[in-house]
Image: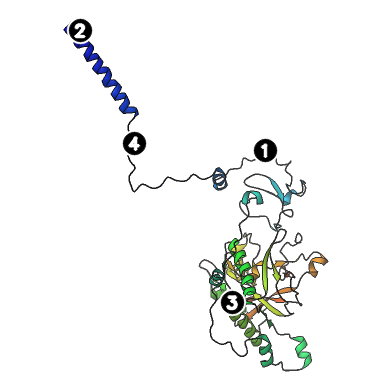
């Protein structure tokens, strides 16, 4: 009987060991995490992941049935843009803002691209954005336009004065808070387009150099800005550096996009702004779809012709819209013009008021001042 009891006791002990081992495997205490371990990552929502994810469009075999999502018409297929994400069609003139040229490369519709949020900037950020200099010293005795007019009396006959009219400096708003509001709208528009503010022509590596911008290369010559008008131009630039900007507001219109509105009375022949941006050769921008390029130099040798490209850097002149010069109503809206001058041997472009502009009136000029090649028939 002893061997039998020994066998049974040994079997019971083995079963107990198996039970204990099972408990150890299933009820083991988790090891504590090391103190320097990073916190658990937060999961992004699916909408955010899909918005940033790469996409691929499966092209159809037949696009004859594509119609515009806005007007529902399939006519004018040469003006029908296809979104590279949703593959839907949109007429260029049905989009808001209107697309004047066929985009180069990929294009996304307003729903797929989304609208950039326009930020409102604080007073300190506005001052830093425009690099305004704090001037505690007294202003010059002849700093105001009225005193400048008193000091520089016109000489010559009345007939001479009518033939040649001098440029007038803009009159900034007297209220400091109003000027900050005006500059804030410009800073928000530039930020929305991922641009930097620049009140000068910039010469970047790989583009045109400073030596290329000489008015003597202009085919047929370029009109020279007089000494008095150069003083007016420099006075306006000095005012901008002090934070005394022209009385203009940049607003967003669903039809025209960003546009400029007068925030005060602007007299005829007032120098509104200088057109600024990166200077480049026209030959480098033949296939560029930037809609704000400005002719700077039309040289006898086409390879030397220059344009101003405000796609990276610029000022408020970049947001002044053009007229539809194919209709009488469009031509009536023009209230300023773009003029090229030779300033100390350098080509410069300035925007000048062609009549009195009332407060609340939008600013327009003719994009086709020289070549008449810009398509404006779809402009509002």
Q: Which mark is residue 300?
A: none
Secondary structure of residue under mark 3: loop
Say which residue label 2 marks. 4
> Closer to the N terminus: mark 2 or mark 3?
2
**Foreground of the two, 165 or 179:** 179
Quarter of the picture containing the C terminus is bottom right
Q: Is residue 28 above or below residue 278?
A: above
**Numbered disc in front, either 2 or 3:** 2
The reply to whether the C-beta atoms of the residues labelled 2 and 3 are less than 8 Å apart is: no
Q: Which mark is residue 30?
A: 4
**Foreground of the two, 58 or 110:** 110
Query: How dense is the environment of label 1, judged by Cα within 10 Å: few (below 14), some, or many (20 and up)?
Result: few
Whole-number angstrom distance, CA of label 1 to CA of label 2: 86 Å
> Closer to the N terminus: mark 2 or mark 4?
2
Secondary structure of residue under mark 4: loop
How far across and down, in percent of the image, does residue 115 sit? 63, 55
């Amino acid at each position: 009987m002893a061997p039998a009891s020994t066998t049974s006791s040994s079997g019971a002990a083995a079963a107990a060991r198996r039970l204990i081992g099972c408990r150890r495997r299933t009820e083991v205490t988790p090891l504590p995490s090391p103190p320097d371990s990073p916190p658990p990552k937060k999961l992004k929502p699916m909408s955010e992941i899909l918005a940033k994810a790469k996409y691929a469009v499966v092209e159809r075999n037949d696009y004859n049935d594509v119609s515009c999502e806005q007007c529902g018409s399939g006519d004018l297929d040469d003006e029908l843009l296809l979104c590279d994400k949703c593959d839907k069609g949109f007429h260029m003139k049905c989009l808001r803002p209107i697309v004047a040229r066929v985009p180069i490369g990929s294009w996304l519709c307003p729903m797929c691209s989304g609208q950039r949020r326009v930020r409102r900037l604080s007073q300190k950020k506005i001052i830093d954005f425009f690099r305004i200099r704090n001037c505690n010293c007294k202003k010059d005795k002849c700093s105001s336009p009225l005193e400048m007019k008193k000091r520089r009396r016109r000489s010559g006959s009345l007939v001479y004065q009518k033939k040649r009219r001098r440029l007038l400096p803009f009159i900034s708003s007297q209220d400091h808070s109003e000027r900050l509001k005006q500059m804030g709208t410009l800073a928000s528009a530039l930020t929305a387009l991922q641009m930097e503010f620049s009140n000068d022509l910039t010469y970047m590596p790989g583009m045109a150099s400073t030596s290329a911008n000489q008015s003597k290369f202009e085919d047929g010559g370029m009109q020279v800005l007089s000494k008095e008008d150069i003083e007016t131009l420099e006075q306006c630039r000095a005012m901008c550096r002090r934070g005394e900007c022209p009385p203009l507001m940049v607003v967003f219109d669903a039809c025209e996009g960003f546009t400029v509105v007068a925030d005060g009375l602007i007299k005829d022949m007032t120098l509104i702004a200088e057109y600024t941006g990166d200077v480049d050769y026209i030959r480098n921008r033949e296939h560029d779809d930037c809609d704000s390029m400005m002719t700077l130099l039309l040289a006898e040798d086409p390879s030397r012709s220059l344009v101003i490209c405000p796609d990276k850097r610029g000022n408020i002149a970049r947001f002044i819209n053009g007229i539809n010069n194919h209709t009488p109503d469009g031509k009536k809206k023009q209230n300023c013009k773009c003029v090229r001058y030779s300033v100390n041997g350098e080509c410069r472009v300035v925007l000048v008021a062609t009549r009195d502009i009332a407060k609340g009136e939008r600013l327009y000029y003719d994009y086709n001042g020289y070549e008449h090649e810009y398509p404006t028939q779809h402009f509002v």
